[in-house]
Image (cartoon, coloured by chain):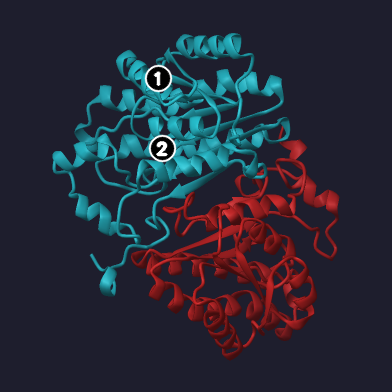
């Protein structure tokens, strides 16, 4: 099994991702707010409470995990708060909530987990970002900026930690779930060269690949696009009009 | 049971270096490999080594610069195997020198092999894949295709063209079942690297220290990424380039602290 006995920590709610790591032999820890406890435990993971918006809480959670398991092999930052609003209508609180959880939270995690990984001289961190961190979209000021920040954070971590044999990578995920808001499924699909949204399994496979030292040992600072061609394309909408 | 069991894979320049590493890896995952090589001796030796390991492999003499040679490759493999599942455009060569005096034959040879050759193979073999409604093309680019290295304008611009081909054709065929992806390896421990070091173009230590991970890539580390990308695990990945460089391109290369050069 690919992750036999490895300690894999995942922030918030992708219980399919937790289950996928568990199926490969990992000891999975879901870290996040209490609402995830039951689902985490059902997916074969251990639950560790953490408020990602609070640096002290993150530090405490990381400490608790290390005390319990003795190590961390993989850390996946997976917080996503899509919210589509014109920038002039976006409140400062909404901005802070999105950037705080997705970007500052990822920094708090990197800050606390990085120490552990560097000391081990082993392990890797994966930030799940979005195609919206690479291409601007109307109404996505907070979400896109946080994701773009997350991409640059990933590259800085890769630059700093590579010397210790610790890798940091990101995923620019395409559309898997249609976010709530004014944009229809048809409109999203019209933007995607492959003509379909992604399946969560397809993003999970990419995470497992990046996390696996037997496969991705020299992949570092990479933002892997799992997007059906989204970020390669910038001609007309819908895609059919390109022909 | 491998994840590529029964898949037919063509690898151009598959006789040596990264290409041969990819051949080994895809064979080990169950694929049957056609080594499309310019140099018959290299091709035959590669196939012998693969078959000795119990893998299924054959050699097809190919000059990727020539449309008729590439068409013959596509036709031969389709006739023999009935299908083509994977194409790895790997054939390449590196010659470096100042642009203002760069020998024209070197320019044309590099562009013919690494840019035109990739196009010709995508065109001829892609046609077979489109008919099947399924297939994966993986182009080998380079971190040189993502930025400037003085004295390498021919190699680097050909590799940049490969990235653009990947994006363009990947989108064009995205709804027809054919994925097109690219890998941009960093400096990798191969005969070409050995030659660069022997010619004192740079020391191994310089290459090692430029990558945040403090070393060059092993061929196997490129091949493992290729396997992932050509497998069904990467079914939503197309029209994109994956760098495998230990963080070389991500890092903006300003020396600082221990990692300073």
Question: Taking A115 as reference, is B145 above or below it?
Answer: above
Question: Which chain is cyan in the picture?
Answer: B
- The part of the image, by quadrant, that contains residue A83 is bottom right
Q: Residue at x 44, y 68 (%)?
A: A156
The residue singled out by tag 2 in the image is B159
Mark 2 surroundings within 10 Å by alpha-carbon count, few (fewer than 14), some (14 through 19), many (20 or more): many
Helix, strand or loop at label 1? It is: helix
Helix, strand or loop at label 2? It is: helix
Q: Nearer the viewer, residue B100 or B215?
A: B215
The residue singled out by tag 1 in the image is B47
Q: Nearer the viewer, residue A146 or B4?
A: B4
Lateral position of residue B197 relative to residue A38, left or right? left
Lateral position of residue A88 relative to residue A108, left or right? right
Mark 1 surroundings within 10 Å by alpha-carbon count, few (fewer than 14), some (14 through 19), many (20 or more): many
Question: Which color is chain A depicted in?
Answer: red
Among the two numbered marks 1 and 2 on one chain, the one whose residue lies closer to the N terminus: 1
- CB under 8 Å between discs 1 and 2: no
Q: Where residue B247 sits in the image (x, y, percent)?
A: 40, 58
Q: Chain ID for label 2?
A: B
Q: Residue at x 36, y 15 (%)?
A: B44
Lateral position of residue B159 relative to residue B239, left or right? left
Q: Are marks 1 and 2 on the same chain?
A: yes
Q: Residue at x 22, y 55 (%)?
A: B206
Q: Residue at x 56, y 53 (%)?
A: A2
Rendered-image quadrant of the C terminus of chain B: bottom left
């Amino acid at each position: 099994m690919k992750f036999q006995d490895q300690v894999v920590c995942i922030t918030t709610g992708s219980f399919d991702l937790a289950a996928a790591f568990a199926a490969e032999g990992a000891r999975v820890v879901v870290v996040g707010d209490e609402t995830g406890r039951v689902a985490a435990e059902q997916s074969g993971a251990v639950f560790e409470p953490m408020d990602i918006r609070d640096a002290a809480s993150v530090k405490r959670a990381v400490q608790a995990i290390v005390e319990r398991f003795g190590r961390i092999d993989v850390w996946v930052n997976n917080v996503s708060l899509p919210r589509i609003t014109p920038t002039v209508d976006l409140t400062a609180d909404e901005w802070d909530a999105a950037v705080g959880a997705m970007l500052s939270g990822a920094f708090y995690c990197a800050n606390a987990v990085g120490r552990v990984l560097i000391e081990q001289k082993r392990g890797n961190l994966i930030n799940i970002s979005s195609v919206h961190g690479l291409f601007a979209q109307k109404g996505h000021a907070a979400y896109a900026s946080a994701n773009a920040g997350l991409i640059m954070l990933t590259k800085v971590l890769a630059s700093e930690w590579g010397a210790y044999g610790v890798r940091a990578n990101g995923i620019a995920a395409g559309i898997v779930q249609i976010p709530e808001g004014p944009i229809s499924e048809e409109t999203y699909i019209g933007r995607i060269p492959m003509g379909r949204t992604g399946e969560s399994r397809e993003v999970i496979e990419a995470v497992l690949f990046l996390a696996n030292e037997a496969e991705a040992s020299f992949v570092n600072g990479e933002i892997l696009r799992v997007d059906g061609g989204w970020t390669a394309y910038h001609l007309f909408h819908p895609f059919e009009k390109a022909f | 049971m491998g994840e590529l069991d029964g898949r037919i894979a063509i690898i151009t320049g598959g006789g040596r270096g990264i290409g041969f590493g990819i051949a080994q890896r895809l064979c080990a995952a169950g694929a049957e490999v056609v080594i499309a090589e310019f140099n018959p001796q290299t091709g035959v030796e590669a196939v012998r080594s693969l078959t000795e390991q119990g893998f299924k492999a054959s050699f097809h003499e190919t000059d990727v610069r020539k449309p008729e040679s590439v068409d013959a490759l596509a036709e031969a493999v389709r006739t023999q195997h009935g299908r083509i599942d994977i194409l790895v455009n790997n054939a390449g060569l590196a010659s470096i020198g100042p642009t203002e005096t760069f020998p024209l034959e070197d320019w044309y040879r590099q562009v013919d092999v690494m840019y035109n050759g990739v196009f010709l193979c995508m065109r001829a073999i892609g046609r077979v894949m489109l008919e099947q409604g399924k297939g994966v093309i993986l182009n080998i680019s380079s971190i040189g295709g993502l930025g400037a290295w003085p004295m390498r304008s021919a190699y680097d611009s050909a590799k940049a063209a490969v990235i653009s081909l990947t994006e363009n054709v990947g989108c064009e065929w995205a709804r027809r079942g054919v994925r097109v992806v690219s890998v941009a390896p960093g400096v990798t421990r191969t005969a070409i690297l050995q030659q660069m070091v022997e010619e004192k173009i740079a020391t191994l230590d310089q290459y090692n220290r430029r990558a945040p991970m403090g070393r060059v890539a092993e061929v196997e580390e490129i091949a493992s990424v290729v396997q992932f990308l050509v497998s069904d695990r990467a079914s939503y990945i197309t029209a994109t380039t994956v760098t495998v460089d230990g963080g070389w391109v991500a890092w903006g290369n300003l020396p600082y602290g221990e990692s300073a050069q």
